[in-house]
Each structure stands twice: as structure tokens, then as C-alpha cells.
Amino acid sequence: MTVIPIPKTCRACVVVKRGEDYQIKLDYNYPVPTPKDDEILIRLTHTGICMSDVHNLKADLGMPAESECVGHEGAGAVVAMGARVTGWAIGDRAGIKPCMYACRSCEVCNEGYDGMCLNGRMAAWRENGSYAQFLVAPASYTNKIPDGLSNELAAPLLCSGATTYRAVNQSTARIGQWLIITGAGGGVGSMAVQYAVAAGIRVIGIDTSEAKRRLCLEVLKCDAFIDFATTTDIAKEVMRITGRGAHASIITGGTAAAYANWWDHLRTGGTMVVVGLPPRGTAIAGADPITMVLKSLRIQGTRVGSFQETHEALAIAAAGKVKPAVTVFPFEQFIETVDLVRTGKLAGRAVIHFDD
């Protein structure tokens, strides 16, 4: 068996305090954990930064968080493993996704929602997340990263990629149909666009700024782009593009405004998929019951991808059909990068490289 020397300490971005005035700090001497018998130790080279990391730090989702390190989309390699681990070898590449453990035997798991397992353990909330360079993870529920996919691209796929892959499937939009993606130029929305385009779906991206317009049209290949800041009547513009409205929409923006009047953008029988998370109590995703009934509209919530959906999302990217739009920042700029994500000004996804 290959043996890799394991350091006693590593790099990490650590929570000092949570709340609206949250504080995080860089730690160059964070303790490296020891894997239990059924765990693998992963040395991460990259971690993505998600807006839900910011919500975790601000503690505005109404969900208790206790971890010292947030983050839930890390990519690296196995450097040690417990005595009872099978199916893994030292050097295998592995990814940290939002749900680190699922029992695969409860009712929720058996219905295909293992990412929301009743007995699950979520990275960044109770378990330490991918803002730490070394992490332990249950071997049985950790996804392998396929050949042909770099760690810097794999990292964001483990959360936003798998989540939006699931969301596109749950939208029920089919080849040639219209799908609106609100927040299309952001880290999550840009993934949704690519999985939809790969499935042959026509996409209208909604976002703002010239950088995001170029990203959506020139790189992600949206069929149309609507700038919500300069368009006076978004519903009218959607009708002009589609004729009768879109078949479905996926809302990835984390603001109340992102959920405003979505029902006016859809045709009869349309589906709206909820992905973006505004602070708890600040937004309502529903519409007037009369509108819902008369147009036969559906609302579908999507939290994270399952183990299998994560596997499929990674495989699609490894085949070259999806390429995350990422900007890679060095570890030393971790704090500034989290703040950049918080502002929503970055086009695409932010990724941190732990190594020099």
C-alpha cells in the first residue's frame, strides 16, 4: 500500500464568529484530522465558494451551524484511509459535496432524496467543510472525480453542478422547449444554463451587467438574455421571445426580487424550480392560487443532488459537455473572495486554490 506522509497541520479559512457581522480568518496551522475505520482523509487542492457559505456565515437561513470551517464543494485526493475502507486507493481523486453522509436506508433515501437523508451529515453545518485543506469523509458516500476533469472544475460541480443538473431534470423542460434561468450569470445559474443547453433546451438567461450578458450569450450559449435592471417589462420580453411564455423556469438568485412575478413568465402547465435561497422570511415563492389553478402551474423545490446525480453531473463535465465558468483565486485571497461572492458581482463561480 502506498503511504503518503501526513502533516499535523494544514491551511484553513476558519469561522471566528457568525452573524451579520461575521468574521473569518486564515489559519496556516489548522489541525489535520485522523480518519476513522470507515473514512478517507482527503487533501483538497481546490474548493468552490457558494452563496450558501455566506448564508451559513451570516446565520440568516434559520439553520444551526457549528462547524469551524464552512464550504461544501472540495476536490482533491485520498492520502489516508481507515482499516475497513474498500473501493478506494491512496491517490484516488475524491470530492466533498454538501451531504457528506447518507444512510441509504431511511424512507427519504429510498425515495431518491439521499442528499436530504434523515440521518445525513451536511458539510459546513455540523461537519467541517471544504474551507479546510484536509478533510475526513465517509468512504461509502464520497464521489470519485473522473479522469479528464481537473480539480478546479470538479470542485464547483460537486454542489452547484449536481444541484442544477437535478433542477434541470425536475423542471421537466424537454428538447427544444424554453427554460428561463434567473441569475444565469452567477455561480449556480451558469451551471444550470450549461446542463440545460447540453440537454437541447432553449435557455433565456436573466441577470444584469455587461460581463454577465457576455458570459451568458458568448460563453454559455444562452439563446437570449434579459437584463432585469434595464428591462421595464420582463414578462413582455419573455412573451416576445417565446410566443406564449417559457415551459419552465429555474430561479437561482438569492433575493426576493428574483422570485417576483415568475408566474407571468410561464405558459400553461409551466414549472418553476426553487434553487436560490434568500434569507429566511424575506421572500415568498408562491403565486395567487387563482393564477396557479388557471395556468396549471407547478412549484418544485430542489436542495442538492443525490449521490447518483453528482456522479452523472461529473461524468457529463468529464465528457466535455459542461465546463464551469470559474475564476481561481489563491488561498491568500480567501477572505476577499468570500466577500466578492457575497456582493454577487462575480460572473461565474469562485474557486480557491489551496496550494502555492
Image (cartoon, rainbow, N blue to C red):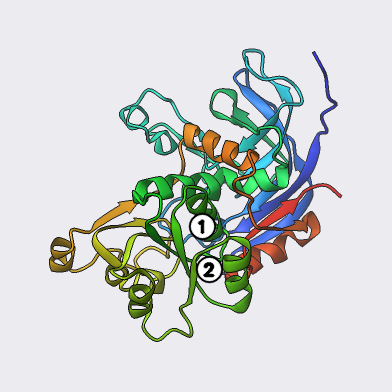
Against 227, residue 161 (above or below) is: above
Against 11, residue 292 (above or below) is: below
Against 256, residue 333 (above or below) is: above
Whether residue 128 sits left or right of residue 245 in the image: it is right
The residue where tag 2 is placed is 20
In this orientation, which residue lies closer to the viewer: 222 or 192? 222
Real-space Cα separation, disc 1 to disc 2, in angstroms: 31 Å
Residue drawn at point x = 37 percent, y = 73 percent: 238
- Residue 106 point in image, percent of width and height: 34, 26
Residue drawn at point x = 73 percent, y = 48 percent: 12
Q: Amino acid at mark 1?
A: Val
The tally of labels here is 2
Tell me the SS state at disc 1. Answer: helix
Whether residue 181 sits left or right of residue 155 in the image: it is left
- Residue 86 point in image, percent of width and height: 62, 14
Residue drawn at point x = 67 percent, y = 20 percent: 88
Residue drawn at point x = 70 percent, y = 27 percent: 34
- Residue 272 point in image, percent of width and height: 32, 58
In this orientation, which residue lies closer to the viewer: 290 or 55? 290
Q: Amino acid at mark 2?
A: Glu
Q: Earlier in the sequence, mark 1 or mark 2?
A: 2
The residue where tag 1 is placed is 193
Residue 182 is tagged as: none
